[in-house]
Amino acid sequence: MLDFENQMFLDILNEDGLVIAAKGIGLESVFINLLKVYSDAGNLVIVLGTTPKEEEFFTGELDSMGVKPLPKLLTSEFSVNDRQSVYMEGGVIFSSSRILVVDMLMDRMPIDLVTGMLIYKAHRIIETSQEAFILRLYRQKNKKGFIKAFSSSPISFTRGFSQVTRVMKSLYVRNLFLWPRFHATIQSTLKENQPDVVELRLPLTPYMVTMQTAILDLIHFSVKELRRINPSLDLDEMTVENALSKCFKKIIKFQLEPVWHQLSGKTKQLLEDLGILRNLLLTLTQYDCVTFNVVVKSLKTTEKALKSAGWMLLDAAENLFITTKARVYGKSLEEDAKPELEENPKWIALAEVLKEIRLEIAVQGEQFPSIKTLIVAEDDRTCDQLRQILESGSKEFLEKIFKKSNSPKNSYEKYDLHNTNENDDESPEHVNETVIVQPLKGGADPYGLHRTLYKLCPRFVIMYDCDVSFIRQVEVYQATHKEHTVRVYFMFYDASAEEQSYLTSLRKEKEAFEMLIREKATMVIPEDREGRTDDHPDFVRDPRKASEMALVPLDTRQMTRKDVRQVVVVDMREFRSELPSLLHRRGIDILPITIEVGDYILTPDICVERKSLSDLIGSLNNGRLYNQSQEMCRHYAKPMLLIEFDHDKPFALQGKYYLSNDDSSLTDVTSRLQLLTLHFPKLRIVWSPGPYATAEIFEELKKGREQPDPAKAASISSDYYTEKNAEKYNPAIHDFMMKLPGINTKNIRRVLNKVEDLGQLISLSLEELHELLENGVNAKELWDALHSSQHLAVLEAEPTGKNKGKKGKSWRGRQRKY
């Protein structure tokens, strides 16, 4: 490990805390070494926040180090007993949040024996997340274990008020470790052995300058128009510079999503146009002239011109259309003329750099195959483009693309803008044994570039596209491989949007760290932040206000009352939502079980089906909500439909207005809800602006009422699924069987699947029926009915549709697929 990596490792090993590091400076190395330390059967360490690819990468790195035992991965394929065995075996465990929170609530996991928690990508932790729920359950029962969190996204901590303080509160940590690129230790470590950097500032062609200027003018017009028609909105972040950054969509979402329903149609169209123009600006330097012309040509249609917010009528738009066409057909602009295809300047520079590398290797007399050159481009599409250019030449490549774009089956209306290869599967990753082309992002393996860098040990790296994270990876790689110097060719267009986007990302990260440093200096941290005492506010699960608690006797304040604990039965699938966590925080115990009817059982009489807005629309369209309401009304006295909105989004059904123009339309959400209430008068609809309000509503509904019985809730089955699957059986026989004593919706499928005909059913003994129905009472009722003389006479005379009188006919005599 390098000096700064070792310091990062020691800091977080000795004390719990949150580590925020700059992208690409080796946070993964620190995390892997921490996993190595705790990979022992005597420890039980849980890792949260990782993806399957990250888990595979970490496990592979530990395996290459010879670490035993390797981390285990808990998935839904493990049974309850298997998961309990894995917990007791110890070591490091990767687990999904949903599985872990259920095991903790059901006491299947020995929380008091857990050594600690490692949180990856901690910037995603919010108060209502499953990870925050897990940490709260963990700290309630384990005061000694550690919590260590990691993040390489400093910008994420700058959105919102005191975001880093709120994340640290949810993590129960006091210490904040900041490691920017300008940290003194990092600076001194990487300065000792720096790569040889060759900066290639390439001028844009005159055509490209004209197009870039036109697009920037159009973006400026759209931003100015947005500000003019929305003077009341805070649009300080809506600038031309931010429109070039990669996080532009996140900025728009953060600022405008809460008021999206209040925006006019023109405002929404302007935002959509900004996204189109931004993509055009980025693809100008990425795409070849033919493909870029196809993209621009597809925008120049009557439909899109009428749909746009007016930018297509500007002179800048006309200049863009004319110049784009001129790059392909020359100044004549005649499509029948011989094309004058313009090559990208980077292609020419790339060919010259590769030629220079070959000459240098030849002069030094080194063996040619032993020297590797790594070319890094933006994405898979650009890499495929470069491979073809290096194999066949840029002119041949452009001619091939031009012919393909002019073929009838590949007209611009149907042209695939994301794939310009005839067969991507045939494009090799290696152009030859010494030149490797890899994408910065995309592909099946997010760590593929890291693996390639350390496995092939290239002597030359050509950065076809700029990326802050990979530049730092190369710096760290050079610092760890001092035996030879890596030469990096850094290519970018001078005075271009590409350069500005790169500089903006550097500036934003620097400003984020400066803000975090100032916040850390003024941060006020409570003594009980780590939750190692029982009087922590999060662990006093009492929803009453402080003023209410001040008016009760001391023993009540200390929670020594003999009140009955409030309980809610929650369906296992609901743990993907925020509501179970908030209910638990209000002092309500959660019982996670699999229930077929409803999502939440509040009392023996109250069953709640929760629907988000998108779920509601989907369930109304496919009829699923009708069947769910029918089942709730059948089994519960007070069925409820909860329509829960997102607290960050508008509390409205249809855009700006609640009612639609056509109230009689069955496709309208409100009309369908009206029909639903007419069909089920018992059904009550609860409207909630968000999960916080829902938790409060549930608590009010439970006051003074009996607690639900989880065994009874689990025993209630839904006839909807049974009836749906029963369609593949003979309907007449299915209906006849349902009339027999002991046969119900729970066991009829088992009988129809395992018994061929009525004769075989009659021949079964009482013990065999008991085994088939898995219920002694039902088996006795059916056996008595089948073997009494009165019932036998009825059975022989019972009609069975087309199979009447045909003894021994199978249940599936008339199948229907479903």
Image: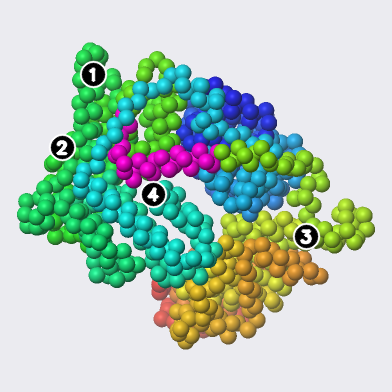
Mark 4 or mark 3, whichever is nearer to me: 4
Relative to 128, 54 lies left or right: left
Residue 768 in view, yes or no? no
Image quadrant for the C terminus?
A: bottom left
Amino acid type at circle 2 is Ser
Which region is colored magenta?
489-513
Up the image or down, 531 lies above or below 594; here it is above
Three-letter amino acid code of the residue under disc 4: Leu
Whichever of labels 4 and 3 marks the residue nearer the N terminus, that label is: 4
Q: Which residue is mark 4?
A: 244
Q: Please, what secondary structure does the residue beneath circle 4 have?
A: loop
Q: Residues within 10 Å of mark 1 (few under 14, many from 20)?
A: few
- The residue labelled by disc 3 is 543
Camera-side mark, 1 or 3:
1
Q: Nearer the viewer, residue 309 or 151?
A: 309
Nearer to us: label 1 or label 4: 4
In the displayed structure, would residue 677 be above or below residue 69?
Answer: below
Which mark lies nearer to you, 1 or 2? 1
Nearer the viewer's eye, disc 4 or disc 2?
Answer: 4
For the question of whether residue 236 can be seen, the reply is: yes
Q: How many labels sit on residues? A: 4
Judging by the rendered image, the residue that carries numbered circle 1 is 360
Could you tell me how far apart the alpha carbons at marks 1 and 4 are, in whole angstroms? 38 Å
Ranked by sequence position, the earlier of labels 4 and 2 is 4
Other residues around mark 2 within 10 Å, as few (<14) / some (14–19) / many (≥20):
few
